[in-house]
């Protein structure tokens, strides 16, 4: 149980009262009462009638807009989590912009003086005091460096760090109360979700991290002339100010007719953007998590530039391998293996009904089996997959949830630019390439060594447990051990160990021989390396011997 709010600072209690009052005014007074927080509501709010005439997602959007920058950003983060919310909520919250006031000039100057010294904006040859964009965390101005380069100057809202700290504390406490008192919400693990939101929000607060994200993207695409990211001017950049190259050109939200009039090939732009995003996911494991149309600019015909890289996602190699296993299981209609992949990728609830999940996975596979490639809609497939995950309360890694929403956004943008755009067809060459790479001898050897390493880690863990138990025995702590059929157990363990060792030797021979054949090393017989042929022959002999021994034992 969480401690009462009465022990918090006066500022936090006042902000809590403001938050709860706004919730109650929009028809969520009953929810406030269920959270045991009704004492914080004014009496006139308690008597207010339930909000009518608006949908629940619309009311939540209005609440976020009224409560200001912190809650607007929380709503925007929620709009990237289709694993948590149904499509109508995602659609409504994706329009969340708010009517944020521009930062006063005096505050902008004070922020720049704190970051750049007494000279403030006078360090620049020109600084446009009228902002070109205002967002929940920062405001962007146009400027010119003394050396003549045009730049975009992003300045964090003064005082937002303190406000965000208070709001995130309130969010975490509300999440704990929801876990304690609202069973339907508790199934989603609101405390974990609040922690994920807090981490994402705080990461975006540091503008220098966005600069590092841009540098990483630029390094990943340094050989691509058709994909760009703004350069960062580090001598002007800090935690509160980010100065980047100013990118000119129409945004992706520009009407198609205007792009045509300016000589842009919309079909080529759609494919360039999609292929760039697929490369981020499949090859780099580091992707732009908010590629909506206002964050994509076309500096010139045939070139795509991504901006506003504060929100990014990361896919570790092992997670990418798990996703590939899931994809292969779905393609081959192996529902059991697909469910196993689901559960390795996500975190299932303790009371998961595996049989029901298996039935739903089979329905998911049957829905798309036999459909021609050009008729598949990646966005529809992803939404069905995420709906399946959400129905069974399986917690996805946050970056994977970001990926699902970003892919849907990229596909939608591609279809606006080119109605015949097909994201699945664009992804096919990348998937074929990763499948070919997966079965290269060096990758097979790497995975084999990984299995051996994992086995060694398990043995070391067993040794630590055994040492701990012996230590407790040495301290006089009684430990009860019971051995039944010890001799039979030892025989079976010895036989199993021998077979595993034998199988590892055979596997090593096959991998090593494949490597020799690929390298064309040593003398050649009938066009094939002799050493490789000998290795394959020895592996075949011992492998056959092992199979015969297993069959003779009567136990596979």
Image (cartoon, helix red, strand yellow):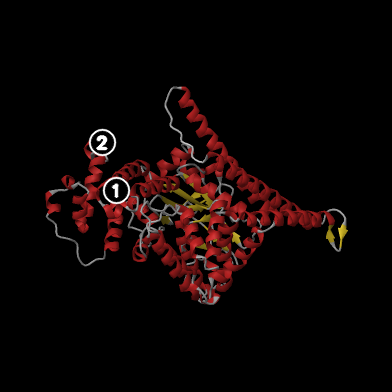
Q: Earlier in the sequence, mark 2 or mark 1?
A: 2
Q: Is 501 rendered above or below residue 340? A: above
Q: Nearer the viewer, residue 355 or 492?
A: 492
At x 46%, y 39%, the residue is 115
At x 42%, y 51%, the residue is 139
Task: State the quadrant of the C terminus.
Answer: bottom right
Give the CA distance from mark 2 to mark 1: 23 Å
At x 43%, y 48%, the residue is 200
Q: Nearer the viewer, residue 1 or 69?
A: 1
In this image, 21 relative to 358: left or right? left
Task: Find out whether the residues at labels 2 and 1 contact each other: C-beta distance under 8 Å.
Answer: no
Q: Nearer the viewer, residue 116 or 144?
A: 116
Query: Callout 1: 10 Å neighbours few (<14), some, many (20+)?
Result: many
Q: Secondary structure at mark 2?
A: loop
Q: Position of residue 236 (x, y in %)?
A: 52, 43
Q: Residue 9's mark? A: 2
Residue 66 seen in the current view: no
Residue for badge 1: 179
Residue 542 seen in the current view: yes
Q: Position of residue 430 (x, y in %)?
A: 61, 64
User: Which marked residue is nearer to the observer: mark 2 or mark 1?
Assistant: 1
Indicate the quadrant where residue 493 lies: top right
Q: Secondary structure at mark 1?
A: helix
């Amino acid at each position: 149980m969480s401690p009462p709010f009465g022990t918090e600072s006066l500022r936090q209690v006042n902000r809590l009262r403001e938050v709860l009052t706004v919730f109650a005014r929009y028809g969520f007074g009953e929810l406030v009462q269920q959270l045991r927080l009704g004492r914080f509501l004014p009496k006139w709010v308690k008597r207010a009638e339930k909000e009518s005439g608006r949908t629940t997602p619309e009311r939540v959007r209005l609440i976020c807009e009224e409560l200001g920058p912190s809650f607007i950003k929380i709503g925007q983060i929620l709009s990237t989590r289709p694993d948590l919310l149904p499509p109508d909520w995602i659609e409504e919250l994706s329009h969340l912009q708010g009517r944020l006031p521009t930062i006063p000039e005096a505050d902008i100057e004070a922020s720049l003086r704190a970051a750049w010294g007494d000279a403030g904006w006078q360090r620049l040859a020109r600084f446009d005091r009228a902002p070109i964009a205002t967002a929940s965390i920062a405001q962007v101005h146009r400027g010119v460096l003394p050396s003549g380069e045009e730049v975009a100057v992003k300045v964090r809202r003064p005082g937002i760090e303190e406000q965000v700290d208070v709001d995130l504390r309130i969010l975490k406490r509300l999440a704990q109360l929801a876990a304690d008192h609202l069973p339907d919400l508790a199934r989603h693990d609101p405390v974990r979700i609040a922690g994920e939101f807090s981490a994402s929000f705080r990461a975006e607060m540091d503008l220098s991290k966005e600069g590092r994200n841009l540098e990483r993207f630029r390094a990943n695409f340094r050989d691509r002339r058709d994909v760009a990211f703004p350069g960062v001017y580090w001598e002007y950049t800090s935690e509160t100010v980010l100065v980047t190259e100013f990118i000119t050109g129409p945004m992706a939200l520009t009407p198609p007719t205007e792009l045509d009039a300016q000589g842009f090939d919309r079909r080529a732009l759609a494919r360039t953007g999609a292929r760039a995003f697929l490369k981020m996911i499949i090859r780099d494991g580091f992707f732009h998590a908010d590629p909506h149309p206002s964050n994509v600019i076309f500096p010139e015909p045939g070139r795509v530039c991504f901006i506003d890289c504060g929100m990014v996602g990361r896919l570790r190699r092992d997670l990418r391998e798990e996703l590939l296993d899931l994809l292969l299981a779905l393609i081959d209609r192996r529902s059991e293996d697909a469910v196993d992949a689901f559960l390795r990728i996500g975190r299932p609830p303790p009371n998961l009904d595996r049989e029901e999940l298996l039935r739903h996975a089979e329905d998911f596979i049957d829905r798309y089996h036999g459909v021609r490639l050009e008729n598949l809609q990646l966005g529809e497939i992803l939404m069905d997959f995420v709906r399946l995950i959400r129905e069974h309360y399986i917690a996805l890694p946050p970056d994977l949830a970001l990926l699902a929403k970003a892919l849907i956004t990229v596909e939608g943008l591609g279809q606006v630019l080119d109605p015949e755009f097909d994201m699945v067809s664009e992804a096919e060459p990348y998937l074929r390439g990763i499948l070919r790479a997966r079965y290269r001898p060096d990758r097979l050897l790497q995975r084999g060594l990984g299995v051996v390493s994992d086995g060694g880690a398990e043995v070391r863990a067993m040794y630590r447990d055994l040492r701990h138990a012996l230590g407790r025995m040495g301290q006089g702590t009684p430990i009860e051990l019971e051995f039944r059929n010890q001799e039979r157990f030892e025989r079976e363990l010895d036989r199993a160990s021998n077979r595993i060792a034998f199988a590892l030797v055979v596997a090593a021979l096959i991998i090593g021989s494949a490597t020799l054949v690929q390298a064309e090393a040593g003398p050649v017989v009938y066009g094939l390396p002799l050493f490789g042929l000998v290795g394959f022959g020895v592996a075949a002999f011992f492998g056959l011997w092992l199979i015969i021994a297993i069959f003779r034992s009567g136990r596979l």
